[in-house]
Structures are given as C-alpha cells and as structure tokens.
Amino acid sequence: MTHATGTYGDFGALRAQALALRREGLSRRQIRDRIHVDNNDLLNRLLEGEPPPDWTGRPNAKDDLRDRARELRLQGWTYDRIQLELGCSKSSISLWVRDLPKPARQDASERAKLAARKRWEHESAVREDARRQTKDEARRAVGPLSDRELFLTGVALYWAEGTKDKPHARRETVTFVNSDPGMIQVFLAWLDLLGIDRDRLRFGVLVHESADVTGIERYWAGLTGAPRSAFYKTTLKKHNPKTVRKNVGESYRGCLVIKVRRSAELYRRIEGAWYGIVGAALGTETSNRT
C-alpha cells in the first residue's frame, strides 16, 4: 500500500498509531493528516471499533436519534429504512454509522416493501393536504351568518338532535343533546337570537363512569359559561367489562343536555318552522305532525 509519502509499512503498527491518536482525542481528519493516510477505507480499518471522542459530535446533535440509528444499523437496516423510520437525512445517518459494518444486501421483496411504504406515506400526506385545503375553502366560503340563516340553522339542528313531541306522548319541551362542542355553541347562539334568557336553561352531563368525570363537568361548565347551580347531577353510564371502549382520550367529553324551562311555546315555533323549511324545499305546503 502506498500514498503520497511512500510505503505505509506494517499495518499493525499503523493501526496502533492511529488508535493512540484517537484516544488522545483527535478527529479523523487530524489523524489522517498526522499519519498521512488519504484512503478513507484504510482509515476506517485502522480506527475500526474505536469510538470517536465526544467533542467531534455535531453541535446540538440529536443523541437519541444517533443512538437509535446505530442500533438499527447493527440490526442490518439500510440507510433508506433508517431514514424512513427516524425522519432524518441520509447524510446524518452516514455520519453516525459509518464505522459500523455494512448490512447484507436486501432481497427484492424487502426493497419492494420499502418502496411501497415510501409511496404510501407520500400519497397519504398529499391526500391529507388536499382534505385540509377543501375543508378550509368550505369554511371560508360560509362567511358571516344573517339572523335568518342562523334561525334556520338552529331549527334544523334541533329537529335533528332535539327531543320531539309525539301524538301519543305530549312532550312539548325543548331538550337538546349533543357531544359536539360546536353544535352546543351554535345552539346556544340560536337561543340567544330567539331571546331565550340563559336563566331558563338547565344542563346535564351524560358520561361514562370510567372517564374523567370531574374534568368533563368542568369542561362543559366552561364552554357554556353556566354556573354549577344550573347543572343537574351528572348521569353516569355503567362500564361493561365485556366491551372495549373506543370513545376514550382527551377528546371524549360525553354528551351535554340542554333543557329550556317553560318552553312549550318555543317548541311549537320550532316544529312549525321545521315544516316550513320542508315545504319550501319541496315546493309544497307541508303540515305539522300534530
């Protein structure tokens, strides 16, 4: 083996010299210049198994990512797989693991799986961006609501989610139940539009007993701005050990019940307005159910 200064001589002696310099804290570049080795493959062999000094690490290097990259490399992962798993650049991965042995070559099926996963993640990100853009455009297109628009919206919301009067069971009272905070806020804004005093409102929480009941009660009180005295005792749903709950996590808040006291007249107005909407949509005269 030769270089600019002549013959290298004994490999063992050269390796011992390189390791000694490494242990003194020299970087690869400094060692290369000191022993005049310009071949990176040879330098790798001379320093094989000897970790670099701490000071040669990149400033603010992500140590956890580096350690994980080295762990995955030792398991035989390629740069592509490590990049996909950790989300860091190939240049960083190369810097972190270049002293480790190269993994065995991937077979065609593994490469195909990796390519498919990359393609799926890219397409998923594109679809998510398109979904978000469509929703944002639709939200901006709504613009401000007129009183009439809010009135009709509230009537439709109530007829979808509120209790109804039946010919065989007279219940001309306004009771609205929903778990969506936005629905609750729109319904309250609608009641304000109709001039319903907030003192006439009573609230109740329906929630699973294994949830954070106190936190959920506090959430609904904050959203509605109602005092605790306006809330009925919370209704707890018993847990069935044979079922696995999916409505869990921070987003689960149970349901809120809103009752309007002395609301028979208001209920009749809602029902009448709803059938007015139906008739207008169909271009016909539609009668109330009772």
Image (tube, grey):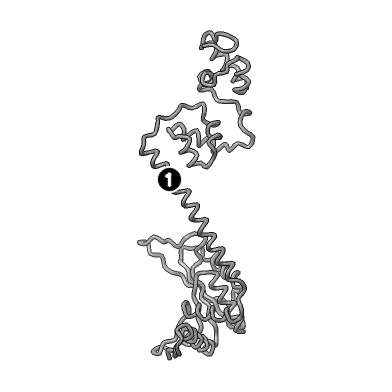
Q: Position of residue 41 (x, y in %)?
A: 51, 21
Q: Which residue is mark 1?
A: 117
Left or right: residue 146 compared with residue 100: right
Q: Position of residue 165 (x, y in %)?
A: 44, 86
Count every numbered label the image shows and give the total. 1
Q: Position of residue 147 (x, y in %)?
A: 61, 81
In the displayed structure, 152 sits above or below 62; it is below
Residue at 52% in and 81% down: 155
Residue 284 lies in quadrant: bottom left
In the displayed structure, 12 sits above or below 57; it is above
Left or right: residue 243 compared with residue 62: left
In the displayed structure, 138 sits above or below 130; it is below
Q: Position of residue 82 (x, y in %)?
A: 48, 38
Residue 55 lies in quadrant: top right
Residue 198 can be seen in this image: no
Please rate how many residues cluster around mark 1, counting C-alpha atoms within 10 Å: few if below 14, some from 14 to 19, many from 20: some
Q: Nearer the viewer, residue 125 or 15?
A: 125
Residue 148 can be seen in this image: yes
Q: Quadrant of the C terminus?
A: bottom left
Q: Nearer the viewer, residue 58 or 132?
A: 132
Which amino acid lies under the numbered mark 1 shown in the image of this protein? Arg
Residue at 62% in and 73% down: 144
In the displayed structure, 123 sits above or below 159; it is above
Residue at 59% in and 67% down: 140
Dot 1 falls on a residue whose secondary structure is helix
